[in-house]
Image (cartoon, rainbow, N blue to C red):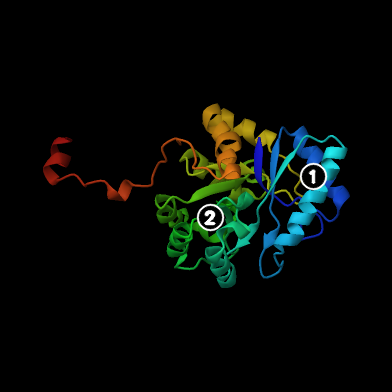
Protein backbone atom coordinates (compact mmCIF):
# COMPACT_ATOMS: atom_id res chain seq x y z
CA UNK A 1 0.00 0.00 0.00
CA UNK A 2 1.08 3.56 -0.69
CA UNK A 3 0.51 6.30 1.90
CA UNK A 4 0.73 9.78 0.39
CA UNK A 5 -0.11 11.77 3.56
CA UNK A 6 2.25 11.08 6.45
CA UNK A 7 4.07 13.47 8.82
CA UNK A 8 7.18 11.32 9.03
CA UNK A 9 10.06 13.81 8.87
CA UNK A 10 11.31 14.64 12.37
CA UNK A 11 11.11 17.97 14.17
CA UNK A 12 9.32 19.99 11.52
CA UNK A 13 5.73 20.24 12.72
CA UNK A 14 3.24 18.37 14.93
CA UNK A 15 4.33 15.04 13.41
CA UNK A 16 7.35 12.97 14.40
CA UNK A 17 9.22 14.79 17.15
CA UNK A 18 12.62 13.18 16.49
CA UNK A 19 14.40 10.69 14.27
CA UNK A 20 13.72 7.74 16.58
CA UNK A 21 9.99 8.45 16.39
CA UNK A 22 10.24 8.58 12.60
CA UNK A 23 11.94 5.19 12.58
CA UNK A 24 9.29 3.66 14.82
CA UNK A 25 6.52 5.11 12.65
CA UNK A 26 8.24 3.58 9.63
CA UNK A 27 8.29 0.17 11.34
CA UNK A 28 4.57 0.42 12.07
CA UNK A 29 3.87 1.45 8.48
CA UNK A 30 5.73 -1.57 7.11
CA UNK A 31 3.87 -3.87 9.51
CA UNK A 32 0.62 -2.40 8.15
CA UNK A 33 1.60 -3.40 4.62
CA UNK A 34 2.71 0.06 3.50
CA UNK A 35 5.55 0.01 0.95
CA UNK A 36 5.74 3.72 0.03
CA UNK A 37 5.30 6.85 2.13
CA UNK A 38 5.17 10.47 1.02
CA UNK A 39 6.59 12.63 3.81
CA UNK A 40 4.27 15.64 4.07
CA UNK A 41 5.38 18.38 6.48
CA UNK A 42 2.94 21.26 6.85
CA UNK A 43 3.27 24.35 4.68
CA UNK A 44 1.20 26.79 6.69
CA UNK A 45 1.26 30.04 8.61
CA UNK A 46 2.14 28.08 11.74
CA UNK A 47 4.80 25.85 10.19
CA UNK A 48 7.12 27.49 7.67
CA UNK A 49 8.04 25.32 4.71
CA UNK A 50 11.79 24.83 4.08
CA UNK A 51 12.34 22.69 0.94
CA UNK A 52 16.10 22.31 1.36
CA UNK A 53 15.77 21.27 5.02
CA UNK A 54 13.11 18.75 4.03
CA UNK A 55 15.41 17.24 1.42
CA UNK A 56 18.22 16.94 3.97
CA UNK A 57 15.99 15.25 6.54
CA UNK A 58 14.59 12.91 3.90
CA UNK A 59 18.11 11.81 2.92
CA UNK A 60 19.02 11.24 6.57
CA UNK A 61 15.90 9.20 7.22
CA UNK A 62 16.37 7.13 4.07
CA UNK A 63 19.91 6.30 5.14
CA UNK A 64 18.79 5.23 8.63
CA UNK A 65 15.99 3.04 7.26
CA UNK A 66 18.45 1.42 4.86
CA UNK A 67 20.90 0.74 7.71
CA UNK A 68 18.11 -0.83 9.76
CA UNK A 69 16.80 -2.78 6.74
CA UNK A 70 13.33 -1.26 7.03
CA UNK A 71 11.88 -1.71 3.51
CA UNK A 72 10.07 1.58 3.02
CA UNK A 73 10.34 3.78 -0.08
CA UNK A 74 10.10 7.47 0.77
CA UNK A 75 8.89 10.39 -1.30
CA UNK A 76 8.47 14.07 -0.46
CA UNK A 77 5.54 16.46 -0.63
CA UNK A 78 3.76 18.67 1.86
CA UNK A 79 0.50 19.32 3.66
CA UNK A 80 -0.39 22.50 1.78
CA UNK A 81 -2.57 25.13 3.47
CA UNK A 82 -4.52 27.47 1.23
CA UNK A 83 -3.00 30.80 2.19
CA UNK A 84 -2.64 33.57 -0.37
CA UNK A 85 1.17 33.42 -0.29
CA UNK A 86 1.20 29.62 -0.62
CA UNK A 87 -1.16 29.62 -3.59
CA UNK A 88 0.93 32.24 -5.38
CA UNK A 89 4.18 30.38 -4.66
CA UNK A 90 2.75 27.06 -5.86
CA UNK A 91 1.48 28.58 -9.10
CA UNK A 92 4.88 30.14 -9.76
CA UNK A 93 6.78 26.93 -8.90
CA UNK A 94 4.52 23.83 -9.13
CA UNK A 95 7.36 21.45 -8.22
CA UNK A 96 8.13 23.16 -4.91
CA UNK A 97 5.23 21.76 -2.90
CA UNK A 98 3.94 18.84 -4.98
CA UNK A 99 4.55 15.14 -4.41
CA UNK A 100 8.06 14.31 -5.61
CA UNK A 101 7.95 17.57 -7.57
CA UNK A 102 5.69 15.92 -10.15
CA UNK A 103 2.49 17.93 -9.81
CA UNK A 104 0.10 16.26 -7.36
CA UNK A 105 -0.49 18.59 -4.41
CA UNK A 106 -2.13 17.76 -1.06
CA UNK A 107 -4.44 20.68 -0.22
CA UNK A 108 -5.87 21.18 3.26
CA UNK A 109 -8.95 23.32 3.91
CA UNK A 110 -9.38 25.63 6.91
CA UNK A 111 -11.15 24.03 9.87
CA UNK A 112 -13.94 26.58 9.71
CA UNK A 113 -15.46 28.33 6.72
CA UNK A 114 -14.75 27.96 3.03
CA UNK A 115 -13.82 30.74 0.64
CA UNK A 116 -16.28 31.23 -2.19
CA UNK A 117 -13.39 31.32 -4.66
CA UNK A 118 -12.17 27.75 -4.03
CA UNK A 119 -13.50 26.40 -7.33
CA UNK A 120 -11.56 29.11 -9.17
CA UNK A 121 -8.47 28.47 -7.03
CA UNK A 122 -8.43 24.76 -7.90
CA UNK A 123 -8.90 25.60 -11.59
CA UNK A 124 -6.00 28.07 -11.54
CA UNK A 125 -3.80 25.46 -9.86
CA UNK A 126 -4.60 23.04 -12.66
CA UNK A 127 -3.73 25.68 -15.26
CA UNK A 128 -0.36 26.02 -13.52
CA UNK A 129 0.29 22.29 -13.92
CA UNK A 130 -0.84 21.12 -10.48
CA UNK A 131 -3.31 18.36 -9.64
CA UNK A 132 -4.92 19.27 -6.30
CA UNK A 133 -5.75 16.47 -3.87
CA UNK A 134 -8.23 17.56 -1.20
CA UNK A 135 -7.18 16.08 2.14
CA UNK A 136 -9.70 14.73 4.66
CA UNK A 137 -12.83 16.70 3.65
CA UNK A 138 -14.81 14.40 5.94
CA UNK A 139 -13.21 16.21 8.90
CA UNK A 140 -14.21 19.70 7.74
CA UNK A 141 -17.23 20.98 9.67
CA UNK A 142 -18.56 23.11 6.83
CA UNK A 143 -18.50 20.17 4.42
CA UNK A 144 -19.98 17.87 7.06
CA UNK A 145 -23.01 20.16 7.04
CA UNK A 146 -23.18 20.42 3.25
CA UNK A 147 -21.01 18.10 1.17
CA UNK A 148 -22.71 19.29 -2.02
CA UNK A 149 -20.19 22.14 -1.97
CA UNK A 150 -17.68 19.57 -3.23
CA UNK A 151 -19.65 18.90 -6.42
CA UNK A 152 -18.14 21.65 -8.62
CA UNK A 153 -14.65 20.70 -7.39
CA UNK A 154 -15.17 17.05 -8.30
CA UNK A 155 -16.66 17.96 -11.65
CA UNK A 156 -13.50 19.96 -12.27
CA UNK A 157 -11.24 16.98 -11.62
CA UNK A 158 -10.32 17.44 -7.95
CA UNK A 159 -8.95 14.29 -6.29
CA UNK A 160 -10.24 13.43 -2.81
CA UNK A 161 -8.30 11.75 0.02
CA UNK A 162 -9.93 10.53 3.24
CA UNK A 163 -8.20 9.51 6.46
CA UNK A 164 -8.13 5.82 7.40
CA UNK A 165 -9.04 6.60 11.02
CA UNK A 166 -12.14 8.49 9.86
CA UNK A 167 -13.40 5.34 8.13
CA UNK A 168 -13.07 3.48 11.44
CA UNK A 169 -14.79 6.15 13.54
CA UNK A 170 -11.64 7.29 15.33
CA UNK A 171 -11.96 10.91 14.18
CA UNK A 172 -15.48 11.39 15.50
CA UNK A 173 -18.93 10.26 14.47
CA UNK A 174 -19.55 13.03 11.94
CA UNK A 175 -16.27 12.33 10.16
CA UNK A 176 -17.10 8.62 10.06
CA UNK A 177 -20.57 9.20 8.61
CA UNK A 178 -19.32 11.55 5.95
CA UNK A 179 -16.37 9.32 5.04
CA UNK A 180 -18.77 6.46 4.33
CA UNK A 181 -21.15 8.68 2.39
CA UNK A 182 -18.26 9.77 0.18
CA UNK A 183 -17.07 6.19 -0.24
CA UNK A 184 -20.54 4.90 -1.08
CA UNK A 185 -20.89 7.54 -3.82
CA UNK A 186 -17.35 6.89 -5.09
CA UNK A 187 -16.24 10.45 -4.36
CA UNK A 188 -13.04 9.19 -2.71
CA UNK A 189 -9.90 8.46 -4.71
CA UNK A 190 -7.22 7.90 -2.06
CA UNK A 191 -7.04 6.50 1.47
CA UNK A 192 -4.15 7.76 3.63
CA UNK A 193 -3.08 7.65 7.26
CA UNK A 194 -2.26 11.33 7.94
CA UNK A 195 0.00 9.80 10.59
CA UNK A 196 1.50 12.10 13.22
CA UNK A 197 3.16 9.79 15.72
CA UNK A 198 3.47 6.38 17.34
CA UNK A 199 0.70 6.61 19.94
CA UNK A 200 -1.16 9.68 18.70
CA UNK A 201 -2.42 8.96 15.17
CA UNK A 202 -0.05 6.14 14.18
CA UNK A 203 0.18 5.02 10.54
CA UNK A 204 -2.61 2.44 10.59
CA UNK A 205 -4.36 1.67 7.31
CA UNK A 206 -4.87 -2.10 7.02
CA UNK A 207 -8.11 -2.26 9.03
CA UNK A 208 -9.70 0.62 7.13
CA UNK A 209 -8.71 -0.93 3.80
CA UNK A 210 -10.29 -4.23 4.85
CA UNK A 211 -13.52 -2.51 5.91
CA UNK A 212 -13.76 -0.61 2.62
CA UNK A 213 -13.19 -3.85 0.69
CA UNK A 214 -15.97 -5.55 2.66
CA UNK A 215 -18.51 -2.72 2.29
CA UNK A 216 -17.68 -1.32 -1.14
CA UNK A 217 -15.71 -4.01 -2.96
CA UNK A 218 -12.08 -5.07 -3.12
CA UNK A 219 -11.49 -3.47 -6.54
CA UNK A 220 -12.48 -0.05 -5.21
CA UNK A 221 -10.52 -0.55 -1.99
CA UNK A 222 -7.39 -1.40 -3.95
CA UNK A 223 -7.77 1.68 -6.14
CA UNK A 224 -7.64 3.78 -2.98
CA UNK A 225 -4.45 2.31 -1.51
CA UNK A 226 -2.56 1.03 -4.57
CA UNK A 227 -3.37 2.31 -8.05
CA UNK A 228 -4.44 5.89 -7.33
CA UNK A 229 -1.78 6.80 -4.75
CA UNK A 230 0.87 5.19 -6.97
CA UNK A 231 -0.21 7.48 -9.80
CA UNK A 232 0.15 10.48 -7.47
CA UNK A 233 3.55 9.23 -6.28
CA UNK A 234 4.75 8.91 -9.88
CA UNK A 235 3.10 12.08 -11.18
CA UNK A 236 0.78 10.25 -13.57
CA UNK A 237 -2.96 10.58 -14.29
CA UNK A 238 -5.22 8.36 -12.20
CA UNK A 239 -6.32 5.12 -13.89
CA UNK A 240 -9.94 4.52 -14.82
CA UNK A 241 -12.22 5.06 -11.81
CA UNK A 242 -15.53 3.62 -10.72
CA UNK A 243 -18.27 6.04 -11.85
CA UNK A 244 -19.16 8.60 -9.15
CA UNK A 245 -22.78 9.00 -8.14
CA UNK A 246 -24.85 12.15 -7.44
CA UNK A 247 -22.48 14.47 -9.29
CA UNK A 248 -24.55 15.27 -12.35
CA UNK A 249 -28.17 14.76 -11.28
CA UNK A 250 -29.03 18.45 -11.65
CA UNK A 251 -27.76 18.33 -15.25
CA UNK A 252 -30.14 15.58 -16.37
CA UNK A 253 -32.98 16.81 -18.62
CA UNK A 254 -36.26 17.00 -16.72
CA UNK A 255 -39.16 14.89 -17.95
CA UNK A 256 -42.08 16.73 -19.53
CA UNK A 257 -45.55 16.52 -18.00
CA UNK A 258 -46.64 13.87 -20.50
CA UNK A 259 -43.51 11.77 -19.88
CA UNK A 260 -44.26 11.90 -16.15
CA UNK A 261 -47.91 11.11 -16.80
CA UNK A 262 -47.17 8.06 -18.93
CA UNK A 263 -43.90 7.23 -17.04
CA UNK A 264 -41.88 7.20 -20.23
Image point 32% across, 46% down: which residue? 249
Residue that carries the numbered disc 1 in the rendered image: 62
Image quadrant holding the N terminus, namely top right
38 versus 66 height, above or below: below
Q: Earlier in the sequence, mark 1 or mark 2?
A: 1
Is 74 or 122 nearer to us in this picture? Answer: 74
Secondary structure under tag 1 reads helix
205 up-or-down from 198: above or below:
above
Which of the pair 40/165 is nearer the observer?
Answer: 40
User: On the picture, is 3 further left or further right than 227?
Assistant: right
Q: In the rendered image, is residue 75 in sight?
A: yes
- Which of label 1 and label 2 is nearer to you? 1
The disc placed on residue 144 is 2
Are there few (<14), some (14-19), or many (20+) residues within 10 Å of tag 1?
some
Rendered image quadrant of residue 140: bottom right
Does residue 217 appear anywhere in the picture?
no
Residue occupying image coordinates x 79% and y 44% = 62
Q: Which residue occupies 58% across, 69% down?
A: 83
Describe residue 250's horizontal placement relative to residue 27 as left or right. left
Q: Residues within 10 Å of mark 2 (few under 14, many from 20)?
A: some
Amino acid sequence: MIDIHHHLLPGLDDGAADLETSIEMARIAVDEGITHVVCTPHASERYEFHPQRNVELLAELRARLADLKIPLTLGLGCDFHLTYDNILAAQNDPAKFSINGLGHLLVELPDYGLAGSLTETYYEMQLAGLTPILTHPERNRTLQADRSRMIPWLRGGLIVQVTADSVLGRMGRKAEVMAHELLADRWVHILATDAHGVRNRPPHIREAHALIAKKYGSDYANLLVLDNPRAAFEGKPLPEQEPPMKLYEDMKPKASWWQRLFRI
